[in-house]
Amino acid sequence: MDNEAPVLGFDIGGTQIRAALASRGRVVATGAEGWPSGLSPAEEVDFIADLGLRLARECAAQGRVRAAGVALAAMTDGEGVVVEWPNRPSWRALCFKSLFEARLSLPVAVEDDANAAALAEWQFGAGRGYRHLLVLVVGTGVGSGLILDGKLFRGRGGWAGELGHVVMVADGVECPCGRRGCLQTVASGRALERAAAARGLRGAPSVTSAAAAGEAWAREAVAACGSWLGLAAANTVALLDLEAVVIGGGLSSLGGDWWDTLGRTFEANLLNRNYRRVGLHKAALPDGAGLLGAAGLAWQLLASAGGAGAEGRDD
């Protein structure tokens, strides 16, 4: 894959929009904005594009931008149309890819944000050298991406790898997806938020702070999140015969009880564990995976098109 050409990468989340100009396999410059208020979805797309175009102008010495990649925290179809995005319901049925391409005057690749993070860790981070890999992104929810046989695995409709929505507890806590007992209800920041609320506290940080101070209830809550993740990762290894699992996202910085319990549960539940070795790694790019993955999507797009790309507009 040619990663020399200048490209734009966008990491579009529920609370923040980040953009990067990348060249020669690295991020050269970044910018970030909160979501603007009072704009229509189409105007919001223009706003996001303008953030990237400003970076392109500021970094003109890097050369002509050839393509753009987008890590989007929404479910899209194969044409880049938004199917569902709980954080921005007004984007439902938005033809994001075509609008974004028209505004940038560039070819654009759009991918689920966890898939983009998986691509980044595989190409540039802790997953380098593996051909069969699971990347878990654990924060407020649980996202995941799969590298199978050296390729990002998307499934039929691009929706493969939704491990966060695999039901772990029958009739468990309701998930934002509408079902109950999904992995992300028991293993993410949402689980810690519930533990905090049960103690009259507010937010997951209050639990992690209490755990760091040695409070038993908080340590148990943190360890339980790690245990569920370890079990889910081991089950995925059993299903797909993976070589390694990489854990990223905001919760991956917890360490201690969380990481220790995750590792023990993972090892204890590995099928044929006496005969197989499966790597378990913390993400090497916990903060930059989305942007680097988005840039990687753009470089892949150029490679598949033989390097063709249009020049971005300055307006």
Image (spheres, rainbow, N blue to C red):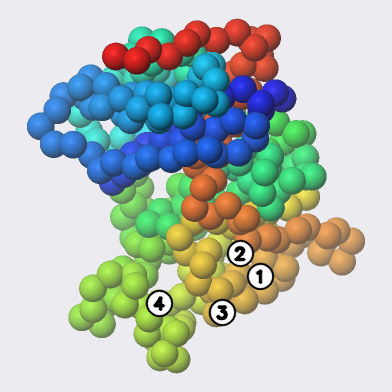
- Of callouts 2 and 3, the N-terminal one: 2
Q: CA distance from mark 3 to mark 1?
A: 11 Å
Q: Which secondary structure, mark 3?
A: helix
Q: Amino acid at mark 3?
A: Gly
Disc 2 marks which residue?
Answer: 230
Q: Mark 3 = which residue?
A: 256
User: Which quadrant of the figure has residue 274?
Assistant: bottom right
Residue identified by numbered label 1: 263
Q: Quick check: marks 1 and 4 in contact, CB under 8 Å? A: no
Give the residue at mark 4: 208
Decide which of tag 2 and tag 4 comes sooner along the chain: 4
Label 4: which secondary element: helix
**Residue sitting at 85 percent across and 58 percent down?**
276
Image vertical order of residue 177 relative to residue 4, above or below: below
Amino acid at circle 4? Thr
Furthest-right residue in view?
A: 275
Q: What amino acid does circle 2 point to?
A: Gly
- Pick whichever, 266 or 308, lies toward us: 308
Image quarter in which the N terminus is found: top right
> Looking at the image, is mark 2 or mark 4 nearer the viewer?
4
Asked if residue 238 shows in the view, the reply is no
Q: In the shown orientation, is residue 158 left or right of residue 17?
A: right
Which of labels 3 and 1 is toward the front? 3
Q: Is residue 283 above or below residue 265?
A: above
Circles 1 and 2: CB distance less than 8 Å?
yes
Please provide percent x and percent y for residue 123.
68, 39
